[in-house]
Image: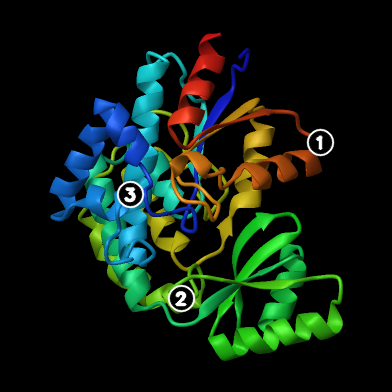
Amino acid sequence: MSATQVMFVFPGQGSQYRGMGSDLHDAHPEARAVYEEASQALGFDLAALSFADPEDEIGLTRNTQPALLAHQIACLRVFEKLTDGAVQPVLSGGHSLGEYTALVAAGSLSLTDGLRLVRKRGELMGEYGEGGMLALTVDEATAKEVADRFYCEVASCNLPEQTVVGGREADLEALAAWVTANLPRKRAVPLATEGAFHTYFMVAAARMFREVLESTEFASPRYPVLSNYTALAHESLPAAVRTRLFFQLFNPVNWVGCLRTAMAEGIDCFVEFGGGLGKEEGPAAKRPNLEGIIKKTLKAGDHSAAYLPAINLATLEATAASFSG
């Protein structure tokens, strides 16, 4: 691998699954150390929840967020071991929850503080999570124009032609019906969430979360971490990092903007850590969450860059080998 401008990326909710991290835990002490610290920080056995999920609770936002953060950091720690720490990013970022993992990876947050922070964030998002979300196959401007008609709001800009909106269930149903009637070549796909995240429905949660942010210790990131709110790198001042995370909770995730910033910075390799998609059971059967989004956005921007997954034991070993080969 000849890449010199590497970006680490971390997915958000929707990439969790039962069994997540079990392969790494069995094979690498670095992963076991992450789960031990996580369980101690949270006061319950996060490994048992992630690997077995006996009560079918990994999909609850309060559990999903720390489970994903722990898995992503476990993947990163194993990757660092396999590459002997030789691969250093010049930029990092994450989608929604993944932004917190990126800050942990860059040393702005400790693992313990990061886990406790997203646990509380998940609790508040779940508690105040009225409504739901729809993925629309339209650009941001069109999505905003349509959403405004139904008291809904843009929640995430994932692709140049894929925008997520949030709102009350009845309003989303009316919005979806309007899309079907008026935009026949476009789709409105319901998402499985506990609420209309990253919209005005989260304002009350954000006001309470501000107190948690202000009581959490932040440091300057060792390398730039992109903000979902601004689509630019976080400032080095901890107070500025806190404010961006506060606004992130009730404003759209500008992932398209983040990737455009990465392209402008000349990133020539993206490495994705953690999570996984697919109906088949077990880590080995999963595919990466952000791969399609990254590749489509790069193509739309006429930008060439490698993409490498590091989401389970097999992909970690293959990606690590590609850097040392």
Relative vertical location of residue 248 with respect to residue 145 in this rendering, above or below = above
Estimate the x, y position of residue 205 in percent, counting from the top left: 35, 73
User: CB under 8 Å between callouts 2 and 3?
Assistant: no
Residue that appears at 43% across and 74% down: 194
Give the left or right position of residue 127, taking residue 261 as reference.
left
Mark 2 or 3: the one toward you: 2
Give the left or right position of residue 48, taking residue 197 as reference.
left
Estimate the x, y position of residue 31 in percent, counting from the top left: 28, 33
Estimate the x, y position of residue 261 in percent, counting from the top left: 63, 40
- Between residue 222 and residue 136, name the one nearer to us: 136
Q: Quadrant of the C terminus?
A: top right
Q: Reading the chain from its start, which is encountered first: label 2 or label 1?
A: 2
Cα distance between the residues tagged 1 and 3: 36 Å
Residue that appears at 44% across and 82% down: 130
Mark 1 or 3: the one toward you: 1
- On the question of residue 152 being in view, the answer is yes
Task: From the image, tell me which residue sits under label 1.
Answer: 302
Question: Could you classify mark 3 by the number of other residues whose Cα lies within 10 Å: few (under 14), some (14-19), or many (20 or more)?
Answer: some
User: CB under 8 Å between callouts 1 and 3?
Assistant: no
Task: From the image, tell me which residue sits under label 2.
Answer: 195
Residue that appears at 35% across and 41% down: 21
Marker disc for residue 239: 3
- On the question of residue 107 being in view, the answer is no
Cα distance between the residues tagged 2 and 1: 35 Å
Secondary structure at badge 2 equals loop
Relative vertical location of residue 294 with respect to residue 90 in this rendering, above or below = below
